[in-house]
Amino acid sequence: MNRLQVHTRNTPAGPVIELVGAFDRLSAPGVQALLPGLGLLAGQQLVIDLTGVTFCDSSGITALIAARNHALAARAGMALSAVPDRVDRTFRVIGLDQVFTTHPTAHAAELAWRPPVG
Protein backbone atom coordinates (compact mmCIF):
# COMPACT_ATOMS: atom_id res chain seq x y z
CA MET A 1 0.00 0.00 0.00
CA ASN A 2 1.18 3.53 -0.65
CA ARG A 3 1.36 5.91 2.30
CA LEU A 4 -1.48 8.43 2.52
CA GLN A 5 -0.64 12.03 1.69
CA VAL A 6 -2.96 14.61 3.21
CA HIS A 7 -3.25 18.19 1.99
CA THR A 8 -5.60 20.78 3.40
CA ARG A 9 -6.67 24.09 1.97
CA ASN A 10 -9.28 26.68 2.79
CA THR A 11 -11.95 28.00 0.47
CA PRO A 12 -14.74 30.52 1.10
CA ALA A 13 -17.05 27.49 1.52
CA GLY A 14 -14.78 25.91 4.15
CA PRO A 15 -11.83 23.57 4.46
CA VAL A 16 -10.95 20.90 1.91
CA ILE A 17 -8.99 17.79 2.84
CA GLU A 18 -7.34 16.14 -0.18
CA LEU A 19 -6.30 12.50 0.28
CA VAL A 20 -3.86 10.64 -1.95
CA GLY A 21 -2.94 7.00 -1.33
CA ALA A 22 -4.21 4.28 0.98
CA PHE A 23 -6.84 5.41 3.50
CA ASP A 24 -6.60 2.57 6.00
CA ARG A 25 -6.03 1.62 9.64
CA LEU A 26 -2.57 3.16 9.55
CA SER A 27 -3.54 6.49 8.02
CA ALA A 28 -7.13 7.07 9.18
CA PRO A 29 -6.19 8.13 12.75
CA GLY A 30 -4.00 10.91 11.36
CA VAL A 31 -6.88 12.27 9.30
CA GLN A 32 -9.18 12.20 12.33
CA ALA A 33 -6.54 13.97 14.43
CA LEU A 34 -6.42 16.96 12.10
CA LEU A 35 -10.18 17.63 12.22
CA PRO A 36 -10.20 19.86 15.34
CA GLY A 37 -7.55 22.16 13.86
CA LEU A 38 -9.35 22.85 10.57
CA GLY A 39 -11.13 26.00 11.67
CA LEU A 40 -14.49 24.82 10.36
CA LEU A 41 -17.12 27.46 11.11
CA ALA A 42 -20.88 27.13 11.52
CA GLY A 43 -22.55 27.31 8.13
CA GLN A 44 -19.45 26.27 6.22
CA GLN A 45 -18.84 22.95 4.49
CA LEU A 46 -16.04 20.45 5.02
CA VAL A 47 -15.09 18.71 1.77
CA ILE A 48 -13.04 15.53 1.70
CA ASP A 49 -11.58 15.01 -1.76
CA LEU A 50 -11.00 11.32 -2.46
CA THR A 51 -9.62 11.80 -5.99
CA GLY A 52 -6.28 10.16 -5.18
CA VAL A 53 -7.47 7.44 -2.80
CA THR A 54 -6.18 4.09 -4.02
CA PHE A 55 -7.60 1.98 -1.18
CA CYS A 56 -10.13 2.58 1.59
CA ASP A 57 -10.88 0.07 4.33
CA SER A 58 -13.32 0.20 7.25
CA SER A 59 -10.94 2.47 9.19
CA GLY A 60 -11.05 4.99 6.37
CA ILE A 61 -14.84 4.82 6.33
CA THR A 62 -14.88 5.27 10.11
CA ALA A 63 -12.71 8.39 9.71
CA LEU A 64 -15.16 9.77 7.13
CA ILE A 65 -18.02 9.24 9.57
CA ALA A 66 -15.96 10.96 12.29
CA ALA A 67 -15.40 13.89 9.92
CA ARG A 68 -19.14 14.11 9.30
CA ASN A 69 -19.80 14.06 13.05
CA HIS A 70 -17.18 16.79 13.52
CA ALA A 71 -18.89 18.93 10.87
CA LEU A 72 -22.31 18.41 12.41
CA ALA A 73 -20.97 19.35 15.86
CA ALA A 74 -19.64 22.58 14.32
CA ARG A 75 -23.09 23.20 12.76
CA ALA A 76 -21.49 22.85 9.34
CA GLY A 77 -22.05 20.60 6.37
CA MET A 78 -19.87 17.95 4.85
CA ALA A 79 -19.45 16.61 1.34
CA LEU A 80 -17.24 14.06 -0.36
CA SER A 81 -15.80 14.58 -3.80
CA ALA A 82 -14.48 12.21 -6.45
CA VAL A 83 -15.49 9.05 -4.56
CA PRO A 84 -13.74 6.11 -6.27
CA ASP A 85 -16.11 3.50 -7.76
CA ARG A 86 -15.04 0.74 -5.35
CA VAL A 87 -15.68 3.01 -2.35
CA ASP A 88 -18.98 4.17 -3.81
CA ARG A 89 -20.10 0.54 -4.20
CA THR A 90 -19.30 -0.10 -0.53
CA PHE A 91 -21.22 3.03 0.47
CA ARG A 92 -24.28 1.81 -1.45
CA VAL A 93 -24.11 -1.67 0.13
CA ILE A 94 -23.96 -0.33 3.69
CA GLY A 95 -26.29 2.63 3.14
CA LEU A 96 -23.74 5.44 3.44
CA ASP A 97 -24.79 6.77 0.04
CA GLN A 98 -27.82 8.08 1.98
CA VAL A 99 -25.57 9.77 4.57
CA PHE A 100 -22.89 11.50 2.51
CA THR A 101 -23.45 14.20 -0.07
CA THR A 102 -21.11 13.58 -2.99
CA HIS A 103 -19.85 15.67 -5.87
CA PRO A 104 -17.69 14.78 -8.88
CA THR A 105 -14.96 17.25 -7.85
CA ALA A 106 -14.01 19.41 -4.87
CA HIS A 107 -14.65 22.45 -7.05
CA ALA A 108 -18.19 21.21 -7.78
CA ALA A 109 -18.75 20.77 -4.03
CA GLU A 110 -17.59 24.33 -3.42
CA LEU A 111 -19.90 25.65 -6.14
CA ALA A 112 -22.85 23.73 -4.65
CA TRP A 113 -22.32 25.24 -1.18
CA ARG A 114 -24.69 27.99 -0.20
CA PRO A 115 -23.82 30.29 2.70
CA PRO A 116 -26.43 30.42 5.43
CA VAL A 117 -28.93 33.27 5.16
CA GLY A 118 -29.26 35.56 8.12
Image (tube, helix red, strand yellow):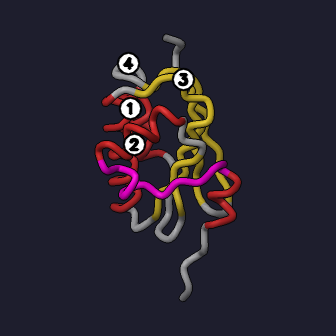
Q: Are marks 1 and 3 in contact (CB under 8 Å)?
A: no
In front: 38, or 59?
A: 59
In the displayed structure, 86 sits above or below 88; it is above
Name the amino acid type tagged 3: Thr
Q: Mark 4 = which residue?
A: 26
Q: Amino acid at mark 1?
A: Gly
Q: Position of residue 82 (x, y in %)?
A: 60, 43
Q: Which residues are magenta?
A: 95-106
Label 2 with label 1: CB-CB less than 8 Å: yes
Residue 94: where, in percent of width, then height? Answer: 29, 44
Residue 17, percent across and down?
56, 42
The residue sitting at the bottom extreme is 118
Q: Are marks 4 and 3 in contact (CB under 8 Å)?
A: no
Name the residue that disc number 2 marks. Answer: 64
Residue denoted by label 3: 54
Q: Amino acid at mark 2?
A: Leu
Which badge, 2 or 4, is on the more N-terminal residue? 4
Q: Sequence order check: which comes first, mark 4 or mark 3?
A: 4
Can you tell which mark lies on residue 43? none
Label 1 vs label 3, nearer the camera:
3
